[in-house]
Image (tube, grey):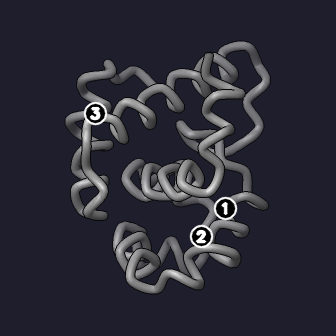
Amino acid sequence: MDLSNQELREQIIHPTLDYLDKSGVAAENILVAIVRQKQKRIEQGSGKGLGPYQIDIATHQLVWDKYLAFHPDLASRVRGLASQRAFLEDPHSELATNLCYATAIAWVLYILHPEELNHHVA
């Protein structure tokens, strides 16, 4: 991804978190750090997921089945970020093709597993 941290923050992360009513500098910093850490993995040839956050299909499914299914208001907002037709045909492809949707899913993953940030981004 050839976006600077500022572009990533201003054009993707901030608007997405604002839409989810989760905005804040700390949240933005976390997501920028996650993208940069995952980018290093891709450059080293060890990226195994989809999109800038390298979220794998099983984890994506888990987010929906184990968290968003029980938080309908947030689920509705996240689903609102997805492309209507593409999401129905292949919801996992949204992680690679829809940066705002991928950001929302990455934020939910952080909510579920904040300790992962400490383990992976140091």
Of marks 1 and 2, which one's residue comes earlier in the chain? 1
Residue identified by numbered label 2: 91
Q: Which residue, given by chain and number where applicable, does mark 1 sit on?
A: 60
State the image coordinates of residue 17 (x, y, percent, origin top left).
30, 53
Task: Tell me the kind of residue under disc 2.
Answer: Pro
Q: Earlier in the sequence, mark 3 or mark 2?
A: 3
Q: CA distance from mark 3 to mark 2?
A: 24 Å
Q: Would you call the spot at circle 2 few (<14 residues within 10 Å), some (14-19), or many (20 or more)?
A: some
Which of labels 3 and 2 is toward the front?
Answer: 3
Q: Depth check: 57 or 71 in front?
A: 71
Give the labeled residue for mark 3. 9
User: Which disc number belongs to residue 21?
Assistant: none
State whether residue 112 is above or below residue 66. Answer: above
Residue 58 is left or right of residue 100, and the answer is right
Percent x, y of residue 29: 37, 30
- Which residue is depicted at the point 24% across and 62% down? 19
Residue at (73, 51) in percent of width and height: 56
Q: Residue at x 22, y 50 (%)?
A: 15
Q: Identify which amino acid the numbered label 1 is placed on.
A: His
Using the image, determine if residue 9 lies above or below residue 46: below
SS for tag 1?
helix
Residue nearest the viewer, comparing 8 with 107: 107
Do the residues bearing badges 1 and 2 touch, measured as CB atoms within 8 Å?
A: yes
How far apart are the alpha carbons under marks 1 and 2? 9 Å
Residue 33 vs residue 95, the one in the foreground: 33
